[in-house]
Every structure is written in C-alpha cells, then in structure tokens.
Image: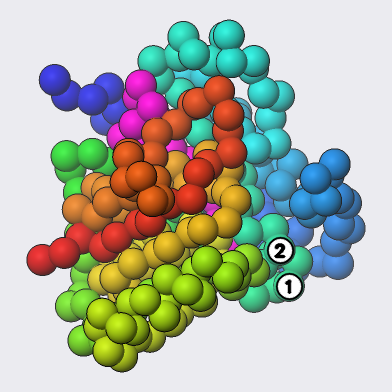
Amino acid sequence: MDHPMKPEWLPIALNAAHKAGVAIMKIYAQPFEVEYKEDHSPLTLADREADAIISQWLEPTMIPILSEEGAKENYETRKNWTLCWIVDPLDGTKEFIKKNGEFTVNIALVENGIPVFGVVYAPALGVMYYGEKGKGAYKVIIPDLFASNIDLHPVGSLPTQEFPKTFTIVGSRSHASPEVNAYVEEQKKKHGEVDFVASGSSLKFCLLAEGKAHVYPRFAPTMEWDTAAGQAVLEAAGGTVVEWPSENPLVYNRKELLNTWFLAEAPMK
C-alpha cells in the first residue's frame, strides 16, 4: 500500500518551510533576544514566529502537528494518531545564536511511527532537501531567499556525488560526547584513515544523503523533532537510521519524545 502523502501536500510542506525560513532570516539579520526554557535550551522570537507560520500552512491538511514549540498533546491522544506532522521550526538554535548559518527548518510527515516525508531547509545556506518514501530524495538550491515563489525544481536526486574515498564521519558541532570519540577511534582501526566533519542541526542527515559523508553516530540526547525530517530525507535517498546499539528502527510519536542514541548511515552503493 502507498503511504498517504498526498501530492498536494508537497508544495504546502515546502512552502511552509520556505516561509518560516524567510521569517527566521529577518530576525537573524537584527540583534535579537535569547530566552532560556526550563531545560536551559535557548529560545528566540525566530523559533516562535517560524512555528506560527508552519502551523498556519499545514492547517489545511487536517493532520495533527507535534512541534517543539507547540502545545504537546498527551500520549493518550497522540497514540491514536496514524498520521502526524513532526516539526522543529528552528533546529540548531545554538547555531542560529552563534550566527554560523547551520540551522534548519524541519518538517516531517510520520505514518504509524515511520517518517514517510521530510523537508529540511537551511535558509542561511540557500539550500533545501526533501525526501519521500519510495520516491527518492532531492536537493533544491534557493539563491533568492525573499523570492515570493520558490522554484522547486531539484538540482538532482540524492546522493548527488560520489562518496569521499576516506571514510567520513559527520558529528555535532555543539554536542560532542566521549562515546562518539570512542566510536571514531574504533572506525580508525577498521578503515585506517577517518575524516571527521562537524555540522549543526539536521544538516548532518542531509550530508549523508548527499554523499558527502558515510555515517553519523549520535550518542547524545536528541528529541523526535530534531531527527524525523532528516531521517525521512536520508531514508528516501536509500540510507538508514537505527537505534544504537540495538539496531532497532528509530520510530516516532512515542510516549517518550526523547530519542535513544542512534546511528545514521549513508546509502551504500
């Protein structure tokens, strides 16, 4: 059976990501206030505005939304959702605050726990990635952020390039962990030389999908909205994401929204 991503939802999701990106970049260009949530994670006006825009765009689909910044339905309600959008209106708030450009808008459609569609938009880098289960993953260049209509013609299906000769591991710019360092050492024994590429937000999944790196070990906390869209893009490109070390599938809309450790691997040719 086909999954339920309707063709008319594709432009809705891509435009939602793009319009949220425009709002984020307007704030990015100005001095902005940073608040801290209860868990000490940073929150800006950009997170809030992007969330409102995405909710507005996705409303016509009549599908419930699980967003980092939105009100969370309790699990008793959520467990009955066969379909939901999982949204991070601004993934990589730390990168946003540091102004290094490596932040994204993440929107995923999840069916019975499986991400079947995802869009990851990096407005400061002018690039959007999207993928749909069974239909492949694509990269779109958006050179003019403020264009009223974006040209959604992809540059090409992912992976768009040959993988590097050297085994390449992509990891977090803001969240290194001793376990990841140990994993890197282990891979050195296996592959000889290893390159380590640091990247912010869910762009790490997209680097794998694109063919720029082989593996992304995440042995530190993430939430469902940090990973659902990136996982959808990577899996649509032929890659895999599994819980680590159990290697069970990483599924969504769980009772506990905190992810386990996971390992994401590029599509191996």
Side of 261 where 247 appears, left or right: left
Residue receiving disc 1: 98
Q: Amino acid at mark 2?
A: Lys
Side of 176 where 227 appears, left or right: left
| Tag 1 secondary structure | helix
- Quadrant housing the C terminus: bottom left
Q: Dominant secondary structure of the magenta stretch?
A: strand
**Is residue 60 in sight in this rendering?**
no
In this picture, which residue range is highlighted in magenta?
102-118
Residue 18 location in percent, x, y? 51, 50
Residue receiving disc 2: 94
Residue density around tag 1, few if under 14, some if 14–19, many if 20 or more, within 10 Å: few
Q: Residue furthest left?
A: 269
Residue density around tag 2, few if under 14, some if 14–19, many if 20 or more, within 10 Å: some
| Tag 2 secondary structure | helix
Q: Is residue 93 above or below residue 136?
A: below
- Quadrant housing the N terminus: top left
Within the magenta stretch, is there residue 106? Answer: yes
Q: Is residue 114 above or below residue 223?
A: above
Q: Is residue 18 above or below residue 224?
A: below
Residue 88 location in percent, x, y? 58, 43
Q: Nearer the viewer, residue 262 or 185?
A: 185
Residue depicted at 65% across the width and 37% down the height: 68
Label 1, label 2: how many angstroms apart (C-alpha)?
6 Å
Q: Amino acid at mark 1?
A: Lys
Q: How many marks?
A: 2
Residue 33 location in percent, x, y? 89, 58
**Is residue 52 in sight in this rendering?**
yes
CB within 8 Å, label 1 to label 2: yes
Residue depicted at 27% across the width and 51% down the height: 240
Within the magenta stretch, is there residue 163? Answer: no
Side of 39 where 25 appears, left or right: left
